[in-house]
Image: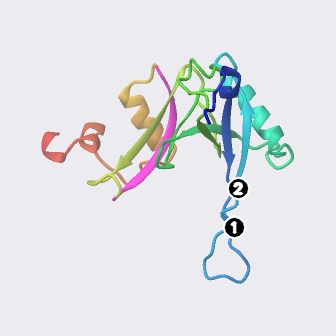
Amino acid sequence: MVTVTTPSDCRWLQVEYRPERRRRGGGEGEEDEERMRAKVPASGNMLLCEVKQRAIAELQLQEQLAGVACCLRQVDRTGKLLPPVCEELSVRDAGVRLMTSLSLCPGTAPKDTQLFLYFSVGTAPSSGLEGEIIVERSSTVKQVGNDCVSFGLLVGLSGCLPCICFSANEC
């Protein structure tokens, strides 16, 4: 038997929502892993904000997410969340492929004039402070560093930004 896939069969995105993990009443640290998924009809020209609204409606999360900032993030093959996608762009322009998964997550999405930055402070990538920040594309490295300090993301670090970014002997 041969299955033929037509273009109309390929016009969807899967959106997954995992509520805040809640501890179950009687378990020893067991976590509720309830995941909700919706297959949202989509096309390459559809804006990602429309995809998000359709997913929220399909998953019946309008009341639960009322007034809560949430964004769409792509998920890689290992299940790791990638940076949030700009919802002002179309599916195609954002580089999102149809028939893939997105995750509905807490947080704001960057605008088309902004960048999402992930950073780690420490000698090894997972040994120190990790954080995420959204900055304007036109920001300088110094402005980004100052934003991180003003948002309390680099608390307790002293010295100049190059010393923070590179090893002390290069400063």
Which is more toward the observer, 83 or 147? 83
The x, y position of residue 122, in whole percent, is 31, 53
User: Identity of the amino acid at label 1?
Assistant: Arg
Compared across the picture, whether 5 is left or right of 138 comes to right
Compared across the picture, whether 67 is left or right of 165 comes to right
Q: Give the labeled residue for mark 2.
A: 19
Rendered residue at 18%/46% (across/down) = 168
Distance between the Cα atoms at labels 2 and 1? 8 Å
Which is more toward the observer, 33 or 10? 10
Q: Give the labeled residue for mark 1.
A: 22
Looking at the rendered structure, the secondary structure element under dot 1 is: loop
Which is more toward the observer, 128 or 50? 50
Rendered residue at 65%/27% (across/down) = 10
> Within 10 Å of the Cα at label 1, are there few (<14), some (14-19), or many (20+) other Cα atoms?
few
Q: Quadrant of the N terminus?
A: top right
User: Identity of the amino acid at label 2?
Assistant: Pro
